[in-house]
Amino acid sequence: MKVPVIDYRQENAANSLLPKSSILSSSGWSHLHLEVYQQPKFEIAEHQHTMHVIACGLLGSPRELEDRKMASGERWLDGKLEQERRRDGDIAIIPAGISHRCNWNTSVEFMVLAIEPALLQLVGQDFVGDSIELTPRFMSQQDVLIQGIFSSLRDELESGKIGGDLLIDSLKTTLAIHLLRNYCSTQPKLSSYSDGLSQRTLQKITDYIHDYLYQDLKLIELSTIAQLSPYYFLRLFKQRMGITPHQYILQRRIEKAKHLLQHSNLSIADIATQTGFSDQSHLTKCFKRQVGVTPKQLRQERSQ
């Protein structure tokens, strides 16, 4: 009998094997795909994935939590069977191509994050080489960093891409680094890059950000200018600036929007476009969070 293959690059990839379809699903994220599920008691047949998969269990309501204290189930990974504890935030890692099946003895909410093997190759090219093999892991332990990435990605999905592609790029690069460091059969050999980012390179990066602030800037663009892998660029930029590229770009966008609100008659919608926000609502949410007032309130203060 042929083992079914789940390819999360395809829409509704797991629907034929699960009782219910996902309640949330990402679309258009490069190298990454997130699904959020709410399922009754179920058993999924043996299958394989074309992408590396991380599954994360979630808490439900307080009443559901009382029921779920007794929640458990079995998982088969590459022919090995284990009874899992499955507490809130526990994760399982299912590498691409590994035979897998599992069951749950109660209703459950969980998230699945699928990662293109090519992402690990891209991020790990400087310090692991071509031999990148993830180690399977049963859902019996937590990983705080991976939990945080799951939470941030879900928030991004629910908020309608408020952070833009650069935030997704930063999260997936951080995830790839973490997987390579902690769940890879080959231990990475890290370069210190003791000189960090040179002032000249940093200037090229910040000039590029200033010139193209209105665009949806991507981490791979900035790391290419610096002639570094996304991993080292992210690491060295934060080392030099004290914040991530995503945080730096958001600061510059807010500063430019503030200047235009105070010194131009452009509409708030036009200012949002010129400063790289997806729309006026996106600008308003970010501006209020950073400045403490909305763009409209700031402009009203100017006219008083």
Image (spheres, grey):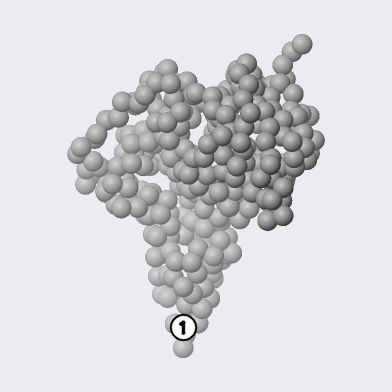
In the depicted view, which residue is nearer to us: 84 or 217?
A: 84
What is the x, y in percent for residue 267? 54, 71
In the depicted view, which residue is nearer to us: 235 or 228?
A: 235
Q: Amino acid at mark 1?
A: Glu
Q: Is residue 69 left or right of residue 233?
A: right
Image: 303 above or below 146? below
Residue at the top extreme of this rendering: 1
What is the x, y in percent for residue 284? 54, 67
What is the x, y in percent for residue 240? 26, 48
Q: Is residue 145 left or right of residue 13?
A: left
Task: Tell me which residue sits at (41%, 34%) in the image.
Answer: 177
Q: Which residue is mark 1?
A: 301
* Residue 161 seen from this side: no
Point out the image quarter for the N terminus: top right
Task: Tell me which residue sits at (40%, 54%) in the image.
Answer: 247
User: How many badges with numbers are in the image?
Assistant: 1
In the depicted view, which residue is nearer to us: 9 or 279?
A: 9
Estimate how packed mark 1 is, as few (under 14), some (14 to 19) or many (20 or more) residues with alpha carbons within 10 Å: few
Image: 188 above or below 112? above
Residue at the left extreme of this rendering: 195
Q: Is residue 246 left or right of residue 240?
A: right
Residue at the front extreme of this rendering: 70
Quarter of image, res 234: top left
Image: 116 above or below 172? above
Quarter of image, res 229: top left
Task: Tell me which residue sits at (62%, 32%) in the image.
Answer: 84
* Residue 235 seen from this side: yes
What is the x, y in percent for residue 135? 50, 23
Task: Tell me which residue sits at (72%, 55%) in the image.
Answer: 63
**Badge 1 element:** helix
Q: Is residue 70 left or right of residue 279?
A: right
